[in-house]
Image (cartoon, rainbow, N blue to C red):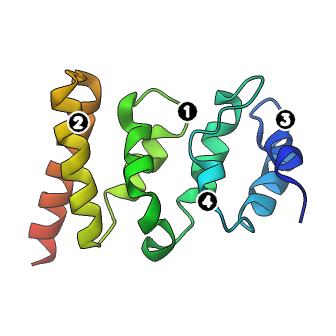
């Protein structure tokens, strides 16, 4: 497996599609998924976020469970690269632990007056409720 710095270089949206796809395949081998959640890089952090999101959404609920809180912080700005991809994946999580994390993030967003994040989390919560109702 390649080192993380090389993988980040490959994941950059400034690369051709083939290089990005190779980066995604290499990143799927990473076990410590936290390195893919809104990574802060010396230059151009947001250039890798979309492809990091593509890797993360390929993981199972169990693999993502310890990262739910951090994945929800990605929704602080729905315009961030990869945010809509993460939003769609989180809308499909079927884990009680996720609900606890969602509730925690909603409280934090309200306490901090972070209206955009609160709006995104409220929308996600409503979408999840509707999805559960249609399954029943």
Mark 2: few, some, or many residues within 10 Å (few <14, many ≥20)?
some
Instruction: Give the Cα separation between the discs numbered 2 and 4.
Output: 23 Å
Q: Earlier in the sequence, mark 2 or mark 1?
A: 1
Q: Which residue is mark 1?
A: 81
Horizontal arrangement in the rendering, residue 135 relative to residue 80 (left or right): left
Instruction: Give the Cα separation between the discs numbered 3 and 1.
Output: 15 Å
Q: Earlier in the sequence, mark 3 or mark 1?
A: 3
Picture quadrant where residue 24 is located:
bottom right
Q: Secondary structure at mark 2?
A: helix
Q: Secondary structure at mark 3?
A: loop
Q: Position of residue 112 (x, y in %)?
A: 22, 24
Tell us which disc is closer to us: 1 or 4: 4
Question: Can you tell which mark lies on residue 33?
Answer: 4
Question: Can you tell which mark lies on residue 108?
Answer: 2
Q: Position of residue 36 (x, y in %)?
A: 63, 49
Q: Position of residue 98 (x, y in %)?
A: 29, 63
Q: Which residue is mark 3?
A: 15
Q: Earlier in the sequence, mark 2 or mark 3?
A: 3
Residue at position x 75%, y 68% in the image: 29
């Amino acid at each position: 497996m390649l080192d993380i710095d090389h993988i980040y270089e490959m994941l950059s949206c400034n690369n051709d599609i083939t290089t990005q796809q190779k980066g995604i395949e290499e990143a799927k081998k990473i076990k410590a998924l936290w390195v893919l959640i809104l990574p802060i890089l010396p230059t151009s952090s947001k250039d890798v976020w979309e492809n990091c999101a593509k890797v993360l959404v390929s993981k199972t609920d169990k693999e993502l469970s310890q990262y739910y809180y951090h994945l929800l912080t990605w929704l602080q700005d729905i315009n961030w690269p990869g945010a809509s991809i993460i939003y769609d994946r989180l809308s499909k999580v079927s884990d009680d632990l996720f609900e606890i994390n969602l509730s925690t993030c909603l409280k934090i967003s309200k306490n901090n007056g972070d209206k955009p994040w609160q709006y995104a989390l409220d929308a996600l919560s409503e979408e999840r409720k509707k999805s559960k109702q249609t399954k029943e």
